[in-house]
Amino acid sequence: MKKSKITVVYIVLIALIILLAAVNIASGSVNIPLREVFQILAGRGTGTNVSIVMTVRFPRALAALLLGGALALSGYCMQTFFHNPIAGPFLLGISSGSKLTVSLFLVFLAGGAMGSFAFMIIAAFIGALAAMSCVLGVSTKVKRMSILLVCGVMIGYICSAITDFVVTFADDSNIVNLRNWSLGSLSGIGWDKVACMAVLIIICTVLVFMLSKPMAAYAMGENYAKSMGVNVKAFRVELILLSSLLAAVVTAFAGPISFVGIAVPHLVKSALKTTKPVVMIPACFLGGSVFCLFADLLARRLFAPTELSISTVTAVFGAPVVIYMLVKRATSRS
């Protein structure tokens, strides 16, 4: 019964990805019939709509799919690391740390140019590791997760405040792009960026999946993991590096996107009724893709032609999930 339910959840997630991706590509200032969208993607399209689909909308939809999956997977890794379902890259300030270092690179080293992908990702990774180091330092002094979350939020606020200060030094021609990026946006993503993020995210996803057995043992406790032959110290370092790199890639290309890393793993776990990493890892990736495709569709179409930041939409739907989780944990302990 459980296997059939897991299969159904996977089928539903894949179907939603295909549907939402198609709707994202079809809708916009120029609406394109779904039949024509599939014809264009199959290489049989003609006319100006081909350029709209293949140059603008299709790469953006792929970016939402990839980055959403990466963010959900990063959150799942952090939740595994801290043994807590409320941990996530945005709430712990990891995304804000990446945002700060990328802003410093763009303003003072790259002149505000949204290019140099490798350096942007390296800058974001450094920021993510720096923020994660601060969180880990606090976690050694504080045992209560609620206090750790507050500290993570404060780290995020500090990094965001410094980022806003840094952006004021950007060239006037780049301030708008930097501000949009710093709020979370998928606009302007082309095939070059999609190719770069796809390589990194796929490699990280495969490496995370290879850690599924140690994750399952680690979830039972460090002593149990050691008894099963897991090198806990090495495993924890690998988990930190992979979760930070996944969060860094998202921030480098789309800015900080809120609550996906916390809400999606919880929703997926509730749907699957299992905590097995071998099942959860692919499902979290698919769930994150669905969540971000849906959020990006709303961000573009809700108040068209004005476009909302995708982080605003993910916060509207993700924050209630986090509140529910906090209340549920508090009531279960009382």
Image (cartoon, grey):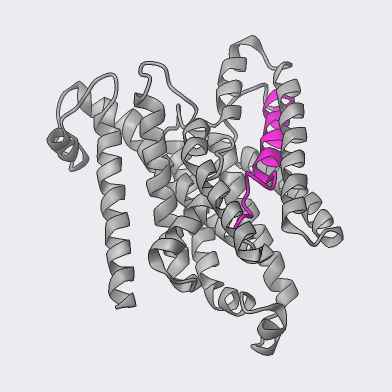
Q: Position of residue 43 (x, y in %)?
A: 18, 40
Above or below: residue 215 compared with residue 145: below
**Quadrant of residue 220 within the rendered picture:** bottom right
Residue at 76 percent of width and 41 percent of height: 155
Q: Is residue 67 magenta?
A: no
Residue 117 visible in the current orientation: no
Residue at 60 percent of width and 22 percent of height: 179
Outermost residue to the bottom: 227
* Majority SS type along the magenta span: helix
- Quadrant (top left, top right, bottom left, bottom right) of the C terminus: bottom right
Is 6 placed left or right of 202 in the picture?
left
The residue nearer to you, when weighing 300 against 25, is: 300
Above or below: residue 169 compared with residue 217: above
Is 296 placed left or right of 156 in the picture?
left
Residue at 65 percent of width and 65 percent of height: 333
Q: Position of residue 176 (x, y in %)?
A: 57, 16
User: What is the span of residues highlighted in magenta in the rendered image?
Assistant: 85-109
The residue nearer to you, when weighing 293 against 318, is: 318
